[in-house]
């Protein structure tokens, strides 16, 4: 089954604490068993890679229950049910969600955050988005970021394709340098594009000392004009002539399935970077784009209170 959203987990989390103090990690494990989650679902990580999706949602469910006074913290990573929580379980609702929690004044105060939500339409919209989507607040932020990055990827590729051909060569230089390859911009500039023959567009040092080199093929094609297996084999032959062991084939379009299969079967290591991957790398290494705003997601420092 799919990983339950954090509102679906509120009532099970409250029930898990009915017997007294519980450890949050134990609750995560027991609820994973209760919901019959697969190993993949249990181990699915957030984009940060620091916490599983399921554990994150259990923590958010516990946090919202705490804001409503249904559970309370006892010590680090432990919590217990309150008298109010026991009253709820005495006549349990079919589901506890954000709408249900609004009957408690503490939770209303938490949502309004000193009436800021009422005076700030964007804050109110954010609260409503959490309630309607079933996602946790940080999941909504990450989803919005993914959508913004997808839009940015399309814009980046459109700009690259519209630019002159020599711009694409400079772009590859800057991206490889940003990723830690090559020496200085001047050295990389001399390397890439200087060969101009044999099916190789350029050479760049894999390290600052030039102990190993990567041969580069760059094709700026419009979307739909995909690279076939023949182009990959030609590039392989060029690498062989130069006695090169590694190659990088970059395009703004895509590679056919036969091209990918060919690259995997060849004896030399050839990495294929299509338009989607190119845009992702540009975003990751801030090439052709810049940071407009930084949003910090903070969490309690448990060690500080010990």
Image (spheres, helix red, strand yellow):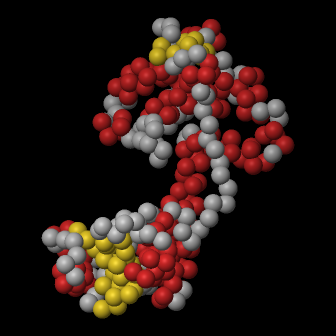
- Residue plotted at (68% across, 41% down): 127
Q: Single out the residue that lies furthest toward the front.
A: 209
Is 121 above or below relative to 52?
below
Report whether 51 appears left or right of 267.
right
Picture quadrant where residue 190 is located: bottom left
Q: Is residue 22 above or below residue 93?
A: above
| Residue 68 visible in the picture | yes
The image position of residue 303, as x and y in percent, is 56, 22
Between residues 90 and 174, which one lies in front from this camera angle? 174
Residue displayed at 79% across by 48% down: 121
- State left or right for residue 177 relative to residue 214: right
Q: Residue at x 59, y 27 (%)?
A: 301
Q: Which residue occupies 56% across, 80% down?
A: 159
Counting from the top left corner in percent of width and height, residue 155 is at 56, 74
Q: Quadrant of the C terminus?
A: top right
Mark count: 0
The front one of 12 and 176 is 176
What percent of the width, then of the height, locates residue 185? 50, 74
Quarter residue 93 falls in: top right
* In this view, 250 is above or below 23: below
**Can residue 219 be seen at all in this image of the molecule?**
no
The quadrant of the image that shows the N terminus is top left
Task: Point out residue 140 in the picture as x, y percentages from the top left corner.
Answer: 58, 47
């Amino acid at each position: 089954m799919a990983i339950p959203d954090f509102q679906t987990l509120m009532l099970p989390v409250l029930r898990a604490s009915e017997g007294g103090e519980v450890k949050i990690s134990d609750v995560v494990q027991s609820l994973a068993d209760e919901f019959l989650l697969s190993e993949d679902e249990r181990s699915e990580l957030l984009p940060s890679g620091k916490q599983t999706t399921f554990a994150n949602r259990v923590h958010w469910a516990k946090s919202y229950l705490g804001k409503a006074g249904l559970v309370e913290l006892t010590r680090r990573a432990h919590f217990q049910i309150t008298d109010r929580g026991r009253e709820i379980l005495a006549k349990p609702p079919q589901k506890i969600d954000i709408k249900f929690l609004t009957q408690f004044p503490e939770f209303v105060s938490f949502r309004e955050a000193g009436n800021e939500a009422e005076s700030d339409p964007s804050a109110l919209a954010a609260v409503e988005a959490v309630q309607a989507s079933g996602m946790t607040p940080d999941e909504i932020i990450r989803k919005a970021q993914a959508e913004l990055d997808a839009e940015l990827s399309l814009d980046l590729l459109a700009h690259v394709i519209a630019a002159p051909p020599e711009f694409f060569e400079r772009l590859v230089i800057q991206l490889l340098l940003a990723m830690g390859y090559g020496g200085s911009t001047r050295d990389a500039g001399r390397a890439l594009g200087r060969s101009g023959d044999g099916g190789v567009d350029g050479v760049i040092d894999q390290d600052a000392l030039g102990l190993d080199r990567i041969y580069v093929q760059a094709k700026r094609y419009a979307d739909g004009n995909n690279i076939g297996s023949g182009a990959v084999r030609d590039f392989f032959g060029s690498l062989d002539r130069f006695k090169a062991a590694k190659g990088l084939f970059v395009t703004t379009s895509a590679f056919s399935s036969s091209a990918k299969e060919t690259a995997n079967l060849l004896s030399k290591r050839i990495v294929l970077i299509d338009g989607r991957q190119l845009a992702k790398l540009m975003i990751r290494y801030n090439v052709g784009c810049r940071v407009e705003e930084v949003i910090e997601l903070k969490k309690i420092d448990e060690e500080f209170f010990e």
